[in-house]
Amino acid sequence: MNKYVIPLQALGQLYFTTLTVPNVPKEQLRETCLKLIETTKNIVRVLREKRLYKFSGIRKLEITYNAKTNTYHPHIHLLHDEKIGELIIDEHLKRNTTSSILAQDTRLMGANDLIEVFKYATKFLIKDNENKNQLNIYSFALDEIMMALDGLRTFQPFGAIRAKNDEDDEFIEDELIAEIVENNDFDYFNWIEHDWFSMSTGEAKSNYKPPEKLYIHYQKLIT
């Protein structure tokens, strides 16, 4: 996050543009993500190179899950420094004819909003529609989302934005160091609900206990 936030803040006033397409079933999720990334890259290229809008920013891919319809909602967030959100949306609608103009959005972005954009590629916790005190985790949906995102870049800078190099990043203080651990007590672990359990002893690996208001959905919905 620190690699991109500082260069983005240096651009000055930012605009937050969201590009959406209709929800899709899991079978179409990855294909839809690939198409959405490709069309957005094409929009940026056309506006920068052919229409000469020299804007800079970052593209972010995000996917949310709708438990009621058992469908997925991939969408693109664009942070950019020129007030061309309406042009971006217009180009998006030309390339995605099933998208609704009402589902697209562009607005000024506040300083605090910038950090919010980097928090997740999908929402792991979802508030229950009927019980507001309950939080849901749809583990099967998260699995589908992670498989769809496998190998894809959720963040992609364009224009003048470049990620800061590790050696230049004052915020990164500790390096990860690989370490070989000699351990003759090899074991296998099974994942059951919310923890890893030893196959030889049955002992839980982390002893994590979900809070009472958290409900984990393990089974796929039947539609």
Image (tube, rainbow, N blue to C red):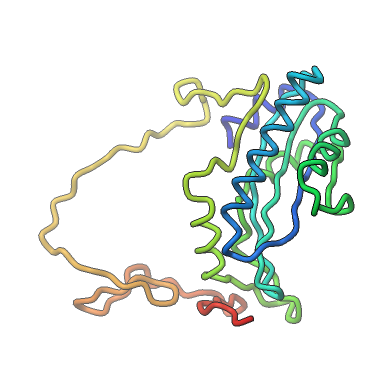
- Looking at the rendered structure, the number of numbered marks drawn on it comes to 0
Q: What is the x, y in percent for residue 8?
A: 69, 28
Q: Residue furthest left?
A: 184
Query: From the image, which quarter does the C terminus lie in?
Result: bottom right
Q: Is residue 185 left or right of residue 94?
A: left
Give whichever of 31, 137 is nearer the camera.
31
Q: Is residue 189 left or right of residue 89?
A: left
**Quadrant hosting residue 95:** top right
| Residue that appears at 57% across and 54% down | 30
Q: What is the x, y in percent for residue 192?
A: 39, 76
Query: From the image, which quarter does the N terminus lie in?
Result: top right
Give whichever of 192, 104 is nearer the camera.
104
Q: Is residue 107 left or right of residue 40?
A: right
Q: What is the x, y in percent for residue 112?
A: 75, 41
| Residue that appears at 62% across and 49% down | 33
| Residue that appears at 51% across and 25% down | 169
**Quadrant hosting residue 175:** top left
Q: Is residue 222 above or below residue 115?
A: below
Give whichever of 76, 181 is nearer the camera.
76
Q: Is residue 36 above or below residue 7?
A: below
| Residue that appears at 13% across and 51% down | 182
